[in-house]
Amino acid sequence: MDRKVFLALLAYTAAIGFVYALYRILQPFLPALGWAAVIAIATHPLYDALRRHLRLSETWVSAIMTLLVFLVLVVPGVLIGLTLAQEIVHAQEYINRWSEAERQAAIDQVLQNPWVAPLVAKVNELVTTYHIDVKEAAVQGGRRLLTVLFGSITGAAKQVALFVFQLVLVLIALFFLYRDGRKLTQGFWSALPIPEERKRVIHDTVENVVSAVVIGILVTASVQGLLAGLAYGLVGLGSPVLLGTLTAIAALVPVIGTMLVWVPAAAYLLLTGQVVEGLILAGWCALVVGSADNFLRPLLISGRTGLPFSLMTLGALGGLAAFGFFGLVVGPLVLAVFILVFEMYRKDMIAFDAGLQAPEPGPPSRPPSAPTGSTGDGKKG
């Protein structure tokens, strides 16, 4: 093997090894770094405005901006989290205080519902041959559900310390992205072998998509959680703050998000005999809460990105399946950049084909007024 080829292969192998080692080192922190990058891109216009008006150094403006993000996003989130934790503790204590007789009475109330009782009787009639007691199966299923629920609550409590650690990492990374982000992005774009105009277009697309998706998701989910929480409180459901927060979290899932919470809540009211309250809750959430999603999300996301909302929804669903909640931003972003790059490629191919397929010049209808060069038709001087 040629010595130069061997050294080149060795250098590339070493580079790949270093990149992989860097990935393994940063892997535990990638979620925090990713969210810090998303927040930095979404709030960059505000950072630029502060830098212009305050006339301070990059370090001071970055520190002020990080503090603002902490006060606007983190503090309310912590307060909601504390309230949510109290609601969970109260709900768990309330259920734990149930005696076996009270639990059995609650299950009996559901099974004796006018809508449920005939169904249970019919099923019991069908399975009598197999000696299966549907009522007992429902009781056992309810107990298993409570066990799984309590296990999930305990597991969630164990993640609090990890969440706080990740939150601190987000704030630290956010500060450095504000301060040094301009240099980092300039270095990244300068390494790409594409024209400057296209770099600018891709850069603007990334900023627009990230900002639109973040603002659209947060505003829509917050509004839906607030509207649903008001309804939960009005119909008399316990822990409306808990249910409203769960609805806001579920609203992050496109299309069916809020239904994951309000449909079981409305079904519970209907099955326990509170028919009017259940119908009011179902109607309010289906019409008002659902309309907020159908109106706000397309307005905030598609209106700014210029891409069809159906494609943005497809990207969000795919990103959610591939990367978790972070994919809600990554999915639409990757899809938007892919469409942009494909459109650039398509235009280049059209221009290339037009150049190749240009018709050969035929005999002129009249002599040209001035020859443009020696092409074999003109006279040589």
Image (cartoon, grey):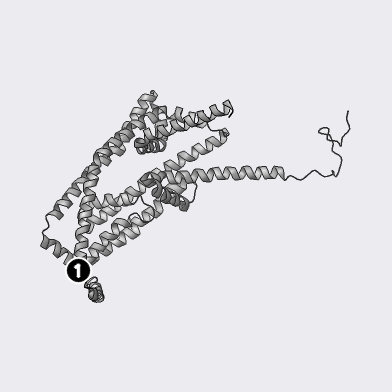
Q: Amino acid at mark 1?
A: Lys
Residue at image location 59% in from the left, 28% down from the top: 2
Residue 342 in the image: above or below residue 43: below
Question: Which residue, as the protein is rendered here, is positioned at the far front?
Answer: 1
Q: Which residue is mark 1?
A: 135
- Measured as percent of width and height from the top left, residue 148 is found at 23, 54
Q: Is residue 274 visible?
A: no
Residue at image location 53% in from the left, 33% down from the top: 192
Residue at image location 63% in from the left, 44% down from the top: 349
Residue 351 in the image: above or below residue 239: above
Secondary structure category for the residue under label 1: helix
Residue 126 in the image: above or below residue 61: below
| Residue toward you, 43 or 34 | 34
- Measured as percent of width and height from the top left, residue 172 is found at 33, 30
Q: Quadrant of the C terminus?
A: top right
Label 1: few (<14), some or many (≥20) within 10 Å?
some
- Measured as percent of width and height from the top left, residue 363 is found at 85, 44
